[in-house]
Amino acid sequence: MSATFNVPSHAKPNLLLRNDGDFRFTDITTAEVAGRQNTFTSLFVDLDGDRRQDLVVAQNTGQVEVFRSLGDGRFTSVPLSTGYGFWMGVSAGDFDSDGDQDLFFSNVGVSFPASLARGDLHDDQPYAGDWLLLRNEGEFRFTDVTRESGLAGMGFGWGSVFEDVNLDGRLDLLVAQNYVKWPPHRIFKFPGKLLLAGAESPPHFSAMPGKTDPGYGNAPLIVDLDGDGRQDIFWLNDDGPSRAYLNRSPGDAVIVSLPDAARSLGARARIVGARSAYTREFSTSIGLGTDQSPVWAFAISPDDREVWLEVEWPDGLLAVLDDPPRNERIEVDRDGVQVRAADGKTRALDARYSGTGAPRAASTARTRSSGTSSGSGSDG
């Protein structure tokens, strides 16, 4: 087996289709976004805080590609040198809690010898086998913090997702593993990874024993299976039964739910004044051919006394809810906020709405009174 990075027939151009409604689509693909590689997955996410959905593409035999949205259906390529790899799963999450969305990409890791995996790469095409964690520095500048975060030297990875599974206020990382067509994985399988984030900067991720998936993993799904407000884990497998783990982590959380609809795309939520300092953004395709839950659980400690919830939509509409209730599902939409109990009954909550239309900065502070911006080597 030899990898093919430079064989034109190995890959086909991508398509970008604009949804015109009523199941009518217009092809707005340009040569820049079409590419000529074996693309595995892509993700729309706002990377620079301008409320526009940028495009991230994981090339299975190429380099990671990032495109900045110009706001009119056109995109322009952002220079990014990641090396040529087998990029597969992609996920976005504010793992360093600075307000913008960072990026993680899975890869074959140490499962394949580099001499075999680099295939037909030319001398000026550097091979990259490790996973990749890019810290978003703003203005489309990214820093590779893979090694500092303890993610180098891992084994074959597929779909991934960021989630605070232990409710400590930091986003953890889950990565599905193993390749059904790779003979060594029939004898020895990687366990799949639930990697807990530490308090360092950048956070160091350490594998949590148990709660993993020794099958031929495809992707982890995050969903509240038992309705207790904690995000549970469902591992999708390609060959064999899937696995589910119920989350029994102690602690309280503010549980935020957005409509699972197109109008929520690009909306962001955060809790101000709480141990959970990260920002979540509503997007699809995180993982590998999967769509994650539109529900977020923000950890709250007993010392978090004066907190409030902010939800902001791409058009600048901002909803602010003071002292949000703990451990109850808060449903936030553009025209109101309510709590939904386990029996389906709802009660309205008094939220403040405003909309300035000003560009959203990657890191902002908001006043409680007005709600306006004030600026500012491994086991595999």
Image (cartoon, rainbow, N blue to C red):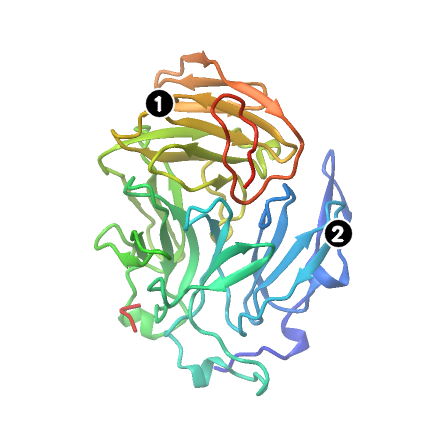
Q: Quadrant of residue 233?
A: top left
User: 162 or 354, which lies in front?
Assistant: 354
Q: Residues within 10 Å of mark 1 (few under 14, many from 20)?
A: many
In the rendering, which numbered label is found on residue 81? Answer: none
Where's residue 112, x and y in %?
A: 40, 77
Where's residue 101, x and y in %?
A: 51, 49
Compare marks 2 and 1 and give the one earlier in the sequence: 2
Secondary element at tag 2: loop
At horizontal 25% and vertical 50% (from top left) the residue drawn is 211
At horizontal 77% and vertical 50% (from top left) the residue drawn is 27
Residue 212 visible? The answer is yes
At horizontal 68% and vertical 61% (from top left) the residue drawn is 77
The answer for how far apart the CA atoms under marks 2 and 1 are is 41 Å
User: 104 or 292, which lies in front?
Assistant: 104
Where's residue 339, x and y in %?
A: 42, 18
User: 139 or 247, which lies in front?
Assistant: 139
> Which residue is most to the bottom?
123
Residue 25 as seen in the image, left or right of residue 238: right
Secondary element at tag 1: loop
196 is higher (above) or lower (below) than 255: below
Q: Quadrant of residue 157?
A: bottom left
Where's residue 47, x and y in %?
A: 58, 50
Residue 351 as seen in the image, left or right of residue 68: left
The residue pinned by badge 1 equals 328
Q: Residues within 10 Å of mark 2 (few under 14, many from 20)?
A: some
Residue 59 as seen in the image, left or right of residue 52: left
At horizontal 49% and vertical 56% (from top left) the residue drawn is 103
The residue pinned by badge 2 equals 74
Residue 225 visible? The answer is no
Q: Amino acid at mark 1?
A: Glu
